Image (cartoon, grey):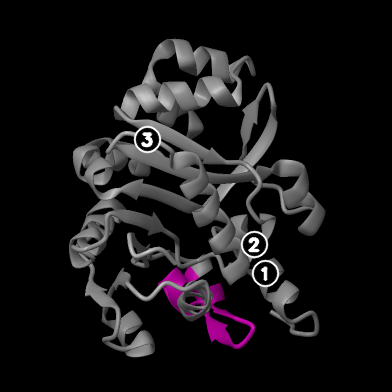
Amino acid sequence: MTEKWGLVIPAGGLVRDPLATALGTPRKALAMIGGKSCVERTLDAARDAGFDRIAVVSGEDVREVIGDDCFVEERGGQIANAAAGVEALADCEWILFMPADTPFLHAEAISHFVQSVEAQLGDAEANWFAAGLCPYSAFLEVLPGFEHPHIKLTDGDYMSGAFYATSREGFLNCAKKFEGFSHNRKSQFRMLMQIGIVPMVKYLFHRMSLAEGKAVLGRFFGGSAIVVTDCDPWSMADIDTVDEYQRLVSEADPGKKV
């Protein structure tokens, strides 16, 4: 892993019932999959991929599981927690963000995203932003019936999930815009409203291409937008509902009853 990279895992997500009861904890990062918590699985994958500068931003219950090694105390909202992680990795120029509730992340998938971003950087501006996607068909191939909101473009349908990255300067310059996106992340309509009526209409009528989407986001954030479209589909599987949790538990241990 290049010296420039650091990894931030904002692991503060708390959930209510009925999901909290199904998980056995209100903290998604501590949900057990295959005998290990989601945050531990994510850390194992990141270290296997070569990351040694890692900030896990969460509460004391997560510290008890992962120890003090890479723990950063949470501040509240998702972007505030991301900012705490970025501050903790003060010597890292490039930051990879990964959630703590994608239990099937693995080292090869992480390395593929990072290497693909590096290959596309070229002469990118100091402000750059990257996201990982996979074709929605590939996602359904590995998880049939695991219906999930997804991105619909003229080029095809895509899933987004585990992989986001930015230059340190890009994050600091656009923290307020990221906060707006984070607040609206469960509603594509509200996210589109942030970037303007014309892009919103084009997207809603399925008339926006991937290239156009990158250009729109680049203008909105004031930098270079990078998209990796062939990420591992398993990295897109996260936990938002009881059904999703039960499905992922069964994928990790087919004989286990939930």
In the rendered structure, find residue 248 and report the number of the disc placed on it: 1
Name which residue type carries label 1. Leu
Between label 1 and label 2, give the one nearer the viewer. Answer: 1
Residue 63 in percent (x, y) is at 30, 84
Residue 172 in percent (x, y) is at 20, 45
Q: Are marks 1 and 3 in contact (CB under 8 Å)?
A: no
Q: Which residues are magenta?
A: 20-37
Q: Residues within 10 Å of mark 3 (few under 14, many from 20)?
A: few
Residue matched to label 3: 124
Quadrant of the image occupied by residue 26: bottom left
How far is disc 1 from disc 3 in space, using C-alphas? 38 Å
Q: Is residue 127 above or below residue 98?
A: above
Name which residue type carries label 3. Ala
Q: Residues within 10 Å of mark 2 (few under 14, many from 20)?
A: some
In the rendered structure, find residue 136 and report the number of the disc placed on it: none
Mark 1 residue element: helix
How far is disc 3 from disc 2 in space, using C-alphas? 38 Å
Residue matched to label 2: 244
